[in-house]
Amino acid sequence: MSTSSASASTLETPVLDSQLSTLLQQITEEGGYAFASMATLAASGDTRAAEAAKDMAWEQLHSGPWHSVVPIWRDAYAMACLHVAKHHYSSGELELALRALDMGLIMGGLALRDDLNLCVGKVTAALRVKEVSENGAEQPKVEWCKDLNLAEMLRLLPVRSLSCNTVGRKSGLSLEGFLQEHLLCGSPVIISDCLTHWPAKDRWNDMNYLKKVAGLRTVPVEVGKSYPRAECNQDLITFSEFLERIQFNGSSSKDMTYLAQHQLFDQIQELKQDIVTPDYCFAGGGEIRSLNAWFGPPGTVTPLHYDPHHNLLAQVVGKKYIRLYPASLSEELYPHSESMLSNFSQVDLDNIDEKEFPKVLDLEFLDCILEEGDMLYIPPNWWHYVRSLTTSFSVSFWWSHTGNPPAP
């Protein structure tokens, strides 16, 4: 077999090849003797050993709270996923290879991310060649249904919605204006007409485009109406299956599926190329902390909570209702006492218990309907409740700078 033919039938992993012995030594030092043995066999082409190593690393990732996992085990999991993907690719099982690589990106560490992305590019290219040969030309554009009954919408929103002050709206806001009038003084604002140059503005309204670039990718989703409450379950499904659930299950389904606070753009590079980080995120020397995707059907809710970072929420597809309370009202919003949920309110704005939470109904707030093409600035520690009014695809940019106010 020629070198080019061999390369075409295998996935190349230059970082893993050069770092294998170092990584195995670090894993062994954390007690991973059995994993190192299996991974060594996997590197020589033993398929069963690759699967066994993957299972061993998976157990370590779930041995306790995520923050307590020793980082090298995340790299171990990524390593095993690469070995599994190599086997599937050489056997022509492209979908299985891609799923293994996605699991490595979702659950694995950073040491082998370049290899994972390199392999994803090769597998997806092969899958697209296969798709064209089987189905021919590209599918026509299919847009989301965006019908919105205003009376029905108002009936579903929390009590007193759109009855107080609405968030101010500005178009063409300068960086200096944003810094002085909003970021430094912690004042929310809607910045309109600022996504017109994003390729996502047109592309993400097309279901067939999303299926083309991400349809076979595996993503983590929440199943249930309200993220991240206990009644929500998590699932790992392909992006195409996720799109079908949005399209056909409807907002009344107990199986409502929501892609919430997932770093989708680190995982799927083609979608990241469709967006542009706003210059506002760097006003005052800002540093991006996280870039998250929020995508789901009408009726999905993120309960009342606050985040410690500056947040620009860009509404690419659809509409959302958002209610905001300043950090100064934290005590009146009854935060959970548990440390893991201390940034979430005990109050369910959709069904307020007036006897248990008597202070809430009289509190003043800001709210708005975030339209397609808008960006909402949410200052650090401002409480916010979010409800999708239509099928909605949003991007949140979290950043911090030295001028952050103290936590409430």
Image (tube, grey):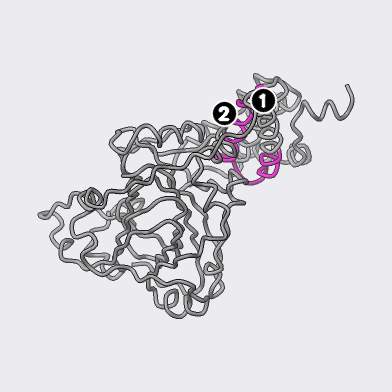
Question: Looking at the image, which is closer to me, 160 or 38?
Answer: 160
406 within the magenta span = no
Is residue 97 in the magenta section? yes
Under circle 2, the secondary element is helix
Q: Which residue is mark 1?
A: 38
Contact, CB < 8 Å: mark 2 with mark 1? Answer: yes
Image quarter in which the C terminus is found = bottom left
Q: CA distance from mark 2 to mark 1?
A: 9 Å
Q: Which residue is mark 2?
A: 56
Q: Main secondary structure of the magenta part?
A: helix
Give the SS element for disc 1.
helix
Looking at the rendered image, the quarter that the N terminus falls into is top right
Q: Picture quarter containing residue 285? A: bottom right
Where does the image place residue 377, in percent across and percent down from the top left?
Answer: 42, 66
Q: Is residue 223 visible?
A: yes
Q: Which residues are magenta?
A: 93-118
Residue 32 rendering spot, x and y as whole percentages? 62, 33
Dot 2 amino acid type = Met
The front one of 320 and 56 is 320
**Residue 158 location, x and y as percent?**
22, 54
